[in-house]
């Protein structure tokens, strides 16, 4: 519940769906190793699930007179890069479609767009994030 009188606050969303895809092998989730190898190919069903989530969030925001900010989204580095890129691009596209500014999670940890060990950007992911 948000205070009705507070109209200068953004509502920050986290988006990591489907969890079985975005969190494959996450050390903090029991059983997530069994999810390893899942792909996100961008089927109509996969896209509709994400689009539907964003549409519901935006409908709520309109009803409440609130502004949404997609403050965290991303995929673990245990996932194949092609799937990560497809998912990331689609999430960014949906954020734009529904009028949300966004911030990727995170810079150089297990979701990172930068590889601290190699001291280099994960170029394909960086390109996806920059719209290339």
Image (cartoon, grey):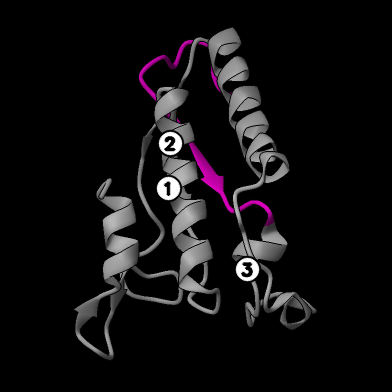
Name above or below for residue 42 compared with residue 121.
Answer: above
> Label 3 vs label 1: CA separation?
17 Å
Q: Name the element at disc 1.
A: helix
Name above or below for residue 11 compared with residue 45.
Answer: above
Q: Number of callouts in the render? A: 3
Tell me the residue at 66%/24% (across/down).
56
The residue that disc 3 covers is: 23
| First in sequence: mark 3 vs mark 1 | 3
> Label 1 vs label 2: CA separation?
6 Å
The residue that disc 1 covers is: 89
The residue that disc 2 covers is: 93
| Foreground of the two, 64 or 17 | 17
Q: Which residues are magenta?
A: 1-18
Is residue 1 shown to the viewer in this render?
no
Q: Residues within 10 Å of mark 3 (few under 14, many from 20)?
A: many
Estimate the x, y position of residue 59 in percent, counting from the top left: 61, 16
Estimate the x, y position of residue 1 in percent, counting from the top left: 64, 25
Q: Which corner quadrant of the image does residue 29 belong to?
A: bottom right
């Amino acid at each position: 519940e948000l205070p009705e009188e507070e109209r200068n606050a953004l509502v920050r969303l986290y988006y990591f769906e489907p969890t079985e895809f975005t969190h494959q092998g996450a050390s903090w989730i029991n059983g997530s190793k069994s999810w390893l190898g899942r792909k996100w190919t961008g089927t109509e069903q996969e896209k509709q699930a994400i689009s539907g989530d964003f549409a519901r969030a935006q409908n709520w925001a309109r009803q409440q007179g609130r502004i949404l900010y997609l403050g965290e989204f991303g995929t673990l580095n245990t996932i194949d890069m092609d799937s990560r890129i497809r998912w990331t691009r689609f999430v960014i596209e949906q954020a734009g479609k529904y009028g949300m500014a966004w911030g990727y999670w995170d810079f150089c940890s297990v979701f990172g767009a930068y590889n601290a060990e190699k001291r280099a950007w994960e170029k394909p992911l960086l390109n996806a994030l920059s719209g290339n």
